[in-house]
Image (spheres, rainbow, N blue to C red):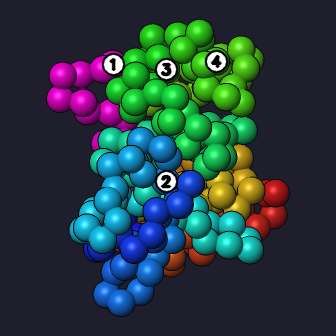
Amino acid sequence: MIASVRGEVAHIGADHAVVEVGGVGLAVQCGPATLARLRLGEPARLATSLVVREDSLTLYGFADDAAKQMFELLQSASGVGPRLAQAALAAHSPQALQAALHGGDVAALTRVPGIGKKGAERLILELRDRVGPVAAGGAGSAQTSAPWQDQVRQGLVGLGWSAGQADAAVTAVAETVDGSPPPVPVLLRHAIRMLGTSR
């Protein structure tokens, strides 16, 4: 998966930027706060998350790794796609979202366009134990699993499986990994085979 991109900013749009990497212009979907930090013609580094759909591959970019990790964590909850996760990060910082989820702050979460009271309560129920308390060092739940597990989980959710199905498949695949894991695309295909009859 593409974990980050670094290069010259060739274009800044309303909801995306184009970063030139090795002669290739990569379109990266970004929130307002991230776009505001970019300067046309200047070098930039964006932490990125690749969202896999049956008919598309979309790269989302973030100013730092904390935002990327929160983006991926939010999508592991049922009913949350990349657009809603991006809207949450446009409304709150990763640290504020972590605090809201851990503290059960329904009011803060409902300030995100697209999240109502029931949706906020579901997010808290599903993610509270995974975000952990807000620490001075900013450590979050994304540290609790290997990077490939988060990437495979995200890919499965992006392809239409529920967060619960994705978690079960990742756990099953993890049991087959002995030593260094194979490349993420191989692991993702393995997980998809396991879920082939579960949709």
Mark before the other along the chain sequence, 3 or 4: 3
Mark 3 residue crowding within 10 angstroms, few (<14) / some (14–19) / many (20+): many
Relative to 164, 60 lies left or right = left
How many angstroms separate mark 2 from mark 4 (CA)?
22 Å
Q: Is residue 137 magenta?
A: yes
Residue 35 visible, this orientation: yes
How many angstroms separate mark 2 from mark 3 (CA)?
23 Å
Mark 3, residue position: 101
Quadrant location of the N terminus in the rendered image: bottom left
Q: Nearer the viewer, residue 100 or 151?
A: 100
Relative to 113, 128 lies left or right = left
Q: Which residues are magenta?
A: 133-147
How many angstroms separate mark 3 from mark 4 (CA)?
12 Å
Q: Say which amino acid is labelled 3.
A: Leu
Pinpoint residue 123: horizontal percent, then vertical percent: 61, 26
Mark 2, residue position: 30
Residue 144 visible, this orientation: no
Pinpoint residue 182: horizontal percent, then vertical percent: 39, 76
Mark 4, residue position: 110
Which image quadrant for residue 20? bottom left
* Circles 1, 3 touching at the beta carbon (< 8 Å): no
Q: Say which amino acid is labelled 2.
A: Cys
Mark 1, residue position: 133
